[in-house]
Amino acid sequence: MDKKMYNFSAGPGALPDTVLQEAHRQLLNYQSSGLSILEMGHRTQLFEDIYAEARDLIRKLLKIPDTFEVLLLQGGATLQFSMAPLNLAIEGKVVDVLHTGYWSGKAIADIKRVSPVRIVASSEDSGHCLIPKVSQGNFNPDAPYVYLTSNNTIYGTQWHIFPDTGDVPIVADMTSDIFSKPLDFSKFGVIFASAQKNVGIAGVTLVIVRRDLAERCPEHVGTLLQYRTHLNRNTVYNTAPVFGIYVMLLVLRWMKEQGGVEGLMKINAEKAKRVYAAVDRHEIYLSRVNPEDRSEMNVCFFIQGGLEQRFIEEALKRKIIGITGHSEAGGIRVSLYNPVTLEAVDALEELMEDFALCYSSFVVQ
Ligand SMILES: *Cc1c(COP(=O)(O)O)cnc(C)c1O
């Protein structure tokens, strides 16, 4: 298969070539069943096998303790902005939140519909260019949970060390960095992530929830919105996105072949190191992110003289796409999710070198 483009999109993001090839092979006649995966029922044995293997691989790759349940839901991370508060709020108690960008802002608006909220720390004054410093003393030990976004997809910052919140569980939106590094589950109550950035295509949302917390939900919350509904089942509660879960399984198998999360972490570190080195090497590129808080998943930078559009056009000539910054942040954003290859990073590095050589003399005095 000729892969047409080097895809650095922030989401939906790139998929491994082997995953696309396998999905293509199985599309018309899944495992010689005479059925397309697209028309396959969610109560068939074929799908139940896909579902079981996907959940098992998620558990193994992330080393998830038995005290947590793995759910594959719909509605994206955005539905979890509502679903987590509906399930985990405690009457009269204030939720502690860490506000580090666009997505935590969206989540806070939805938490507020259910509970009072206290912003423990915010990066807003810095234009979301850093991760605030917090320690256990900053958190209310009586809070039902602490909310944070592990990787700020739009501004390019990342929590490299999760805060110590004492006994209060963290609820984390990990949409843009799940499976990029190992996790210490003792800190978390709920971790959720849309699939389309690091682990598949849109339509599936991974939710990893501590069983005891899933039992907290008040009865007035709708059935599908209760985590409890999805606990202790080997089958999906309602019609599942069969194809989305199948593609997720293919990505999970691919991750295992890459040496699992530990193997991917090494490759991701290498990719990010190389792109940031190119940014730092040339004055024409400007990174506004506090160096120690730089994201390994989304590298955001600006180009002197407002040459971003020129850079994007030059990139397209080299089949590099998906690098336009989010409209909230502007600039250039390069997303280096798990499936983005070192070969793609080579092409980007070459572009950054050539562009700097060509334009530096015009804009850097
Ligand atoms: C992309 C993104 C979302 C939104 O995901 P949807 O699938 O559109 O709901 C939420 N949080 C983060 C951190 C993201 O990167």
Image: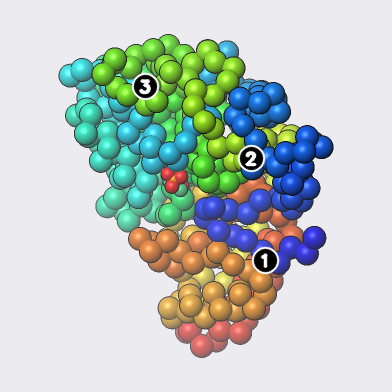
Residue behind mark 1: 5
Residue behind mark 3: 223
- The spot of residue 105 in percent (x, y) is 30, 45
Give the amino acid at mark 1. Met
Precedes in sequence: disc 1 or disc 3: 1
- Mark 2: secondary structure: helix
Q: Quadrant of residue 168?
A: top left
CB atoms of marks 1 and 3 within 8 Å: no
Is 87 or 242 nearer to us in this picture? 242
Label 2 to label 1: alpha-carbon separation: 29 Å
Camera-nearest label, 2 or 1: 2
Give the amino acid at mark 3. Thr
Q: Residue at x 48, y 77 (%)?
A: 309
| 344 displayed left or right of 204 | right
| 206 displayed left or right of 92 | right
Is 150 or 230 nearer to us in this picture? 230
| Residue count near mark 2 (Cα–Cα under 10 Å), binned few <14, some 14–19, many ≥20 | few
Q: Residue at x 39, y 12 (%)?
A: 215
Q: Is residue 282 visible?
A: yes
- Mark 3: secondary structure: helix
- The spot of residue 1 in percent (x, y) is 80, 60
Residue behind mark 2: 39
Precedes in sequence: disc 3 or disc 2: 2
